[in-house]
Image (cartoon, rainbow, N blue to C red):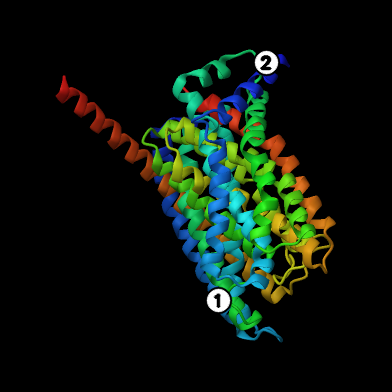
């Protein structure tokens, strides 16, 4: 247990340090969201309607951007080999790494949401609905994305391949995240149904992600 | 003859060389019979002649999922039993499966235009099949991104098994969500709801398309094995020249 706690603490510390790159995700999120009104035009009612979708898309792309760092740095300096050979089960270690990554790179996105909601003319209840769905949904993005990150690191190919592999898996999360936020803001459908499916997606990815990532690391590293 | 005997590629090649002409012939006959029956089938009282798209659309859609199932079994073969032909089977199946999925999407869209008034609708069944298509493409990209086949095989196997989660979602999407796409008519609780005049040609076409897949798949596996042989011969020659 202490080994896992140490791993989480180490990963968070590295991510927040200079060169860690966790905060680049937030900056990217901010930039994408600010770009949208330039593309759509400063039409406030339209922005209100599209707001949840823009925020979700921005968060999805921002989390994709930082996923590359989940294993690459550890692979380069050799600590990934130590983790694979260590006594802690690799599945648990992967889950701990993903949790640390979510705490360092995912939570800042959620914290930034209220500010960005203000820019998109969302009122308080709409912003909190989006933030709540992001809070529940971003773990699913991190844990499914971890599979792609593990595959990419064993193949020494990051970047575009990672995006191609991960994006189809994240479509359901996007669908139900936006559906739940829209339901909370405009109705008439109930908020509960898509929100429960979003929770279910997160829980499933919590189980599947570490096993798949551990399998690909175990079979792929040499 | 068990599965383990086929692990020897030479045995596999000689066996498939004998089987393939028969398979190809049976495929051609079944598809011809199926097409004739489909052309002779009565028009639907509501849909008119467009119902005949079904005889091509439904087998393609079934195979789109079936091929991913075959690839998932091969992925288990790669990861668990390390069967040497499993990754050849998985690699050869991916482009064929992508083609079936693409055809299912295209025929469905052509059928949707007269029936629903739109080529594309973001409905649960259509969206999940589109995701399947994207995952086929991603898998093919993964195979092409790595030059070492055994390494690529293991990575692709993990991704295939993860993608298999999509299969039950596609199958049950029409029951879980209230969609534009019609619910299952053939394989469903309480027996089929399809009339015999449509069911028999459909089943003939389905068997014909499945045989088509088996034929294409075996041929693609043979090509892949030969391609790997050529590659290793070239590597040997290159290392001899270097020495």
* Rendering coords of residue A7 (x, y %): 63, 20
Q: Is B158 situated left or right of B182 in this image?
A: left
Residue named by callout 2: A3
* Rendering coords of residue A58 (x, y %): 59, 53
Q: Chain of mark 1?
A: B
Q: Is A29 situated left or right of B227 in this image?
A: right
Rate crowding at label 2 as few (under 14), some (14 to 19) or many (20 or more) other CA atoms within 10 Å: few
For residue A1, above or below residue A194: above
Q: Name the residue: 77% across, 46% down.
A: A200
For the C terminus of chain A, the quadrant is top left
Residue named by callout 1: B110
For the N terminus of chain A, the quadrant is top right
Q: Please state which of the two labelled residues, at mark 2 or mark 1, is closer to the viewer.
A: 2
Q: Name the residue: 67% across, 74% down.
A: B198
Q: Nearer the viewer, residue A53 or B38?
A: A53
For residue A84, above or below residue A42: above
Q: Are marks 2 and 1 on the same chain?
A: no
* Rendering coords of residue A43 (x, y %): 61, 73
């Amino acid at each position: 247990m202490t080994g896992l706690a140490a791993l989480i603490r180490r990963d968070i510390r590295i991510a927040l340090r200079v060169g860690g790159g966790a905060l680049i995700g937030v900056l990217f999120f901010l930039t994408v969201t600010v770009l949208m009104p330039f593309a759509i035009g400063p039409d406030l009612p339209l922005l209100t309607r599209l707001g949840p979708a823009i925020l979700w898309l921005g968060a999805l792309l921002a989390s994709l951007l930082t996923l590359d760092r989940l294993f690459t740095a550890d692979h380069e300096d050799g600590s990934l080999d130590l983790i694979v050979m260590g006594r802690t089960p690799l599945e648990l270690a992967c889950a701990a790494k993903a949790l640390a990554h979510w705490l360092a790179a995912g939570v800042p996105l959620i914290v930034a949401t209220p500010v960005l909601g203000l820019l998109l003319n969302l009122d308080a209840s709409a912003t909190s609905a989006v933030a709540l769905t992001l809070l529940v949904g971003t773990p699913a993005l991190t844990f499914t994305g971890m599979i792609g990150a593990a595959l990419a690191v064993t193949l020494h190919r990051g970047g575009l391949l990672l995006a191609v592999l991960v994006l189809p898996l994240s479509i359901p999360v996007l669908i139900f995240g936006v559906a739940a936020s829209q339901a909370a803001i405009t109705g008439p459908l109930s908020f509960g149904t898509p929100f429960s499916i979003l929770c279910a997606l997160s829980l499933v990815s919590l189980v599947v992600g570490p096993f798949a990532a551990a399998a690909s690391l175990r079979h792929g590293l040499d | 003859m068990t599965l383990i005997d086929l692990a020897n590629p030479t045995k596999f090649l000689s066996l498939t060389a004998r089987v393939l002409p028969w398979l190809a012939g049976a495929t051609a006959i079944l598809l011809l019979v199926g097409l004739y029956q489909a052309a002779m089938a009565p028009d639907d009282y509501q849909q008119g002649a467009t119902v005949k798209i079904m005889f091509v659309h439904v087998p393609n859609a079934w195979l789109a999922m079936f091929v991913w199932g075959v690839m998932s079994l091969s992925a288990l073969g790669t990861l668990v039993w390390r069967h040497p032909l499993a990754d050849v089977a998985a690699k050869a199946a991916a482009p064929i499966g992508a083609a079936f999925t693409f055809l299912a999407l295209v025929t469905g869209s052509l059928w949707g235009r007269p029936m629903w008034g739109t080529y594309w609708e973001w409905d649960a069944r259509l969206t999940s099949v589109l995701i399947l298509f994207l995952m086929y493409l991603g898998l093919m990209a993964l195979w092409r991104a790595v030059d070492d086949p055994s390494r690529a095989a293991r990575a692709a196997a993990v991704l295939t098994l993860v993608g298999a989660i999509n299969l039950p979602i596609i199958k049950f999407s029409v029951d879980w969500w209230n969609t534009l796409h019609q619910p299952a008519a053939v394989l469903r609780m309480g027996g089929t709801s399809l009339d015999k005049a449509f069911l028999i040609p459909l089943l003939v076409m389905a068997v014909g398309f499945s045989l088509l897949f088996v034929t294409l798949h075996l041929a693609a596996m043979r090509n892949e094995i030969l391609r790997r042989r050529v590659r290793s011969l070239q590597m040997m020659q290159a290392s001899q020249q270097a020495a």
